[in-house]
Amino acid sequence: THDLGVVAGVADRIAVMYAGRIVEHADVRSLYRAPAHPYTKGLLESIPRLDVRGQELATIKGLPPNLMRIPSGCPFHPRCPYVQQVCVDVVPHSLVLGDGRTSECHFAQEVLDDSAR
């Protein structure tokens, strides 16, 4: 589903997909508290909230990739605020962050640290 509000009420664990790949996998509470992939972070930031009425909704810049022409390296790199050259050149491997949590991002720990603030 694309409705993360619904997922929180019915799931114990979440696998977030982008361009046909699982980019983050975590228990619901950990993922909502502090995502470890920039796409997950963008999805959570774009959920409308009742406590911030009247403000413009956050969006993920750019467009999803054409699945017939997925970009080199990390498929999210054209839209990613954390992008560096390694993201363009190298497909990230699944990084184990503990407690069964994984992220396919070269900068997963940095994203996680930023999300926890």
Image (tube, rainbow, N blue to C red):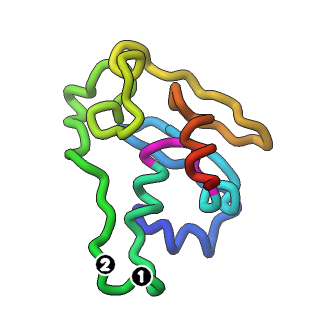
Compared to residue 63, the image places residue 72 above or below, namely above
**Residue 38, located in which quarter of the rendered image?**
top left
**Contact flag, marks 1 and 2 (Cβ < 8 Å):** yes
Q: Amino acid at mark 1?
A: Val
Q: Is residue 22 left or right of residue 29?
A: left
Q: What residue is drawn where x is 48% and y is 52%?
A: 41
Residue placed most toward the observer, 48 or 113: 113
- Work out whether residue 53 or residue 21 is closer to the camera in this orientation and state it: 53
Q: Dot 1 corresponds to which residue?
A: 52
117 in relation to 94, above or below: below
Crowdedness of circle 2 by 10 Å Cα count: few (<14), some, many (20+)? Answer: few
Along the viewing direction, whichever of 64 and 53 lies nearer the viewer: 53
Q: Residue at x 55, y 67 (%)?
A: 7
Q: Residue furthest right?
A: 99
Report which quarter residue 53 is drawn in.
Answer: bottom left
**Residue indicated by mark 2:** 55
Amino acid under disc 2? Gln
- From the image, which quarter does the C terminus lie in? bottom right
**Residue 54 lies in magenta, yes or no?**
no
Which region shows up in magenta? 34-39
The spot of residue 98 in percent (x, y) is 77, 38
Secondary structure of residue under mark 2? loop
Depth check: give the residue in front, 114 or 106: 114
Q: Main secondary structure of the magenta part?
A: loop
Residue 12 % position (x, y)? 70, 62
Farthest-out residue, front: 117
* Residue at (69, 42) in percent of width and height: 101
Position of residue 23 measured from the top left corner of the image (x, y, whole percent):
50, 38
Q: Quadrant of residue 99?
A: top right
Distance Cα–Cα, label 1 vs label 2 = 6 Å
Q: Is residue 50 above or below residue 86?
A: below
Q: Is residue 37 magenta?
A: yes
